[in-house]
Amino acid sequence: MSGLFIWISSIILFFMIPINNIDKDLQNYYKEYMDLAKSECNKIKPPTQFSIRFGKLSDDNIGVCTYYLNRREILIDISYWRMSNLETRKQLIFHELTHCILDMHHIDLESNYMNPYLLELPEEELYNQVKQNMHTFCNNRG
């Protein structure tokens, strides 16, 4: 009986303990996004177990947010990252963070950072759109 209790307690703790594994080259982008979220909407919380890392993606994907049972993960294509400028990198990370944290889908407008085809936007426009999405998230969460 005590073995079962220990096993169940371990499972519960596993799901509750925050575990973040964010590549050091991506931490500043994550921090900037979460600082913006904190200033725009106190209802926005990062997933308890979350990772952002580099990898090799196929099918012309440059970034992907994947939902698992107890965690979320962003994978960024390392080849695309290496050839990108700072503005494009930020837009890509903010795009994927919006998927994973705000549960938002693609928008089929060329002038939107949530378009599935990354077209670089001016930084001010990127921030305006991200803030708008954060406000919408807050207003829809009651």
Image (cartoon, helix red, strand yellow):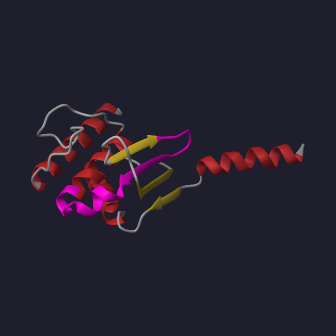
Residue 60 in percent (x, y) is at 30, 43
Q: Residue furthest front?
A: 59
Q: Residue at x 49, y 58 (%)?
A: 20
Residue 85 in view: yes
Q: Which is more toward the observer, 61 or 31?
A: 61
Q: Position of residue 132 (x, y in %)?
A: 19, 41
Q: Is residue 121 left or right of residue 94?
A: left
Position of the N terminus by quadrant? top right
User: In percent of the image, x 33 and y 62: which residue is there?
Assistant: 31
Q: Residue at x 31, y 54 (%)?
A: 38
In the image, residue 43 lies in the stretch drawn in magenta? no
Let me know if residue 68 is in the magenta part. yes
Q: Quadrant of the C terminus?
A: top left
Counting every numbered tag in the picture gives 0
Q: Position of residue 68 (x, y in %)?
A: 52, 40
The residue range painted magenta reads 67-88
In depth, the one of 107 and 139 nearer the eye is 107
